[in-house]
């Protein structure tokens, strides 16, 4: 059996098994270098030795290794779907009137640029930008309606909020509350600050698995289409989301990550990573041991290896196109 995952390269099941096993080994080797998030007490209970990798192909077939069915909270990965919903509901111009699309170069919860440099959040992947996007969704969709979209995109009908994590985050919300009221003072948020924070936090507390994140990655890779052919988002919305994931998805490590891995990727402090190889594959990773930027510490070595071995770097020479051109 073989499957065409890479650009013009057929990968046998045995080869894929060997590649995924080596990626897993490389990820495991660096786990001692990371630490679980403790600023949200409930997240601090995660097992720092946990690791799972799921790869979803175009036909919905999954290859899983490690802790791929263990549930954890999606955290900042939710920002991608929230942005997609805002773009679908309001359009690009309206969304980017209130939040910019530039890499920040600062930590995900920084106030520096917002307070001293810009009157707008730098991008939708940092907390200030995502809180602004949540404010845009208020009154347009209920949490339950948004949750249903998350379930569809991730092909995970059992997805629910983790109430313990939600309460823990709401009790330790000082930083995000400061960001939100600063946004309100600048006229970026309306008066529904607390409702916005509740929706933002509720979305971050949705529970996923590495498998559901891989399905999410595949939905994005296929321009918003599910495996059954249903379109959840337009291709243009997915283009925007993939671009911002590439330039801003790994916070202040996004540039280095884009060079080494070359895949649109989004991280969350719950230990999740979702990565997109356009029109080829979605990758979901769970590893709650984080680096100093708040990204899964195993994610870099895993995705760098998979990108190279599966030839899925965004700027990899596309041998399929090359052969087509040669036949002209």
Image (spheres, rainbow, N blue to C red):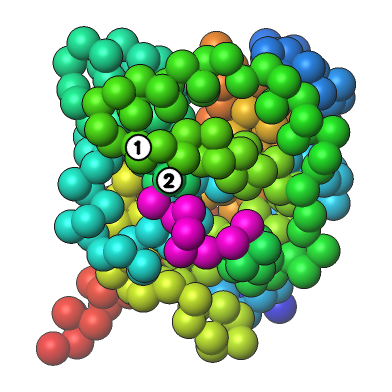
The image quadrant where one finds the C terminus is: bottom left
**Residue 319 lies in the magenta-colored region:** no
Q: CA distance from mark 2 to mark 1?
A: 7 Å
Image location of residue 84, percent across then percent down: 41, 60
Q: Please indicate whether residue 114 sits to the left or right of residue 202 in the image.
A: left
Q: Disc 2, disc 1: CB below 8 Å?
A: yes
Residue under label 1, please give it: 189
The image quadrant where one finds the N terminus is: bottom right
Location of residue 28 by image quarter: top right
Q: Nearer the viewer, residue 131 or 67?
A: 131
Q: Is the residue 16 above or below the residue 130 in the image?
A: below
Image location of residue 121, percent across then percent down: 29, 31
Q: Please indicate whether residue 161 sits to the left or right of residue 281 in the image.
A: right
Secondary structure at badge 2 equals: helix
Image location of residue 229, percent across then percent down: 54, 88
| Residue 121 visible, this angle | yes
Q: Nearer the viewer, residue 45 or 259?
A: 45
- Which residues are the magenta region? 136-143
| Residue 77 badge | none
Location of residue 62 by image quarter: bottom right
Residue at (77% x, 69% y) in the render? 157
Location of residue 270 by image quarter: top right
Q: Please indicate whether residue 35 sits to the left or right of residue 143 in the image.
A: right
- The prevailing secondary structure element of the residues shown in magenta is loop
Residue at (36% x, 68% y) in the render? 88
Residue at (26% x, 64% y) in the render? 91
Residue under label 2, please give it: 135
Residue at (46% x, 17% y) in the render? 178
């Amino acid at each position: 059996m073989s499957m065409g995952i890479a650009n013009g390269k057929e990968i046998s099941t045995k080869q894929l098994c060997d590649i995924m096993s080596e990626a897993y080994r490389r990820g495991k080797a660096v786990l001692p270098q990371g630490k679980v998030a403790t600023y949200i007490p409930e997240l601090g209970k995660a097992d720092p030795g946990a690791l799972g990798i799921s790869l979803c192909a175009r036909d919905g077939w999954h290859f899983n290794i490690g802790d791929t069915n263990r549930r954890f909270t999606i955290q900042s990965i939710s920002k991608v779907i929230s942005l997609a919903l805002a773009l679908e509901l309001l359009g690009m111009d309206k969304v980017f009137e209130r939040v910019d699309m530039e890499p920040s170069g600062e930590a995900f919860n920084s106030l520096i640029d917002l307070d001293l440099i810009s009157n707008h959040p730098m991008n939708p992947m940092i907390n200030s930008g995502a809180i602004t996007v949540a404010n845009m969704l208020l009154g347009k969709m209920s949490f339950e309606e948004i949750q249903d979209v998350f379930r569809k995109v991730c092909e995970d009908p059992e997805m629910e909020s983790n109430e313990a994590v939600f309460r823990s985050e709401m009790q330790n919300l000082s930083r995000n509350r400061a960001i939100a009221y600063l946004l309100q003072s600048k006229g970026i948020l309306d008066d529904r600050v607390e409702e916005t924070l509740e929706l933002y936090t509720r979305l971050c507390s949705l529970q996923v698995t590495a498998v559901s994140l891989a399905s999410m990655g595949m939905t994005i890779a296929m321009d918003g289409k599910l495996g059954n052919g249903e379109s959840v988002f337009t291709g243009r919305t997915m283009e925007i989301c993939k671009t911002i994931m590439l330039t801003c998805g790994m916070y202040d490590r996004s540039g280095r990550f884009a060079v080494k891995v070359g895949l649109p990727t989004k991280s969350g402090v719950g230990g999740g990573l979702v990565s997109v190889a356009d029109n080829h594959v979605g990758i979901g990773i769970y590893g709650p041991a984080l680096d100093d930027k708040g990204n899964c510490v195993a994610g870099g070595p895993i995705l760098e290896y998979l990108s190279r071995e599966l030839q899925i770097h965004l700027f990899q020479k596309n041998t399929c196109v090359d052969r087509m051109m040669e036949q002209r």
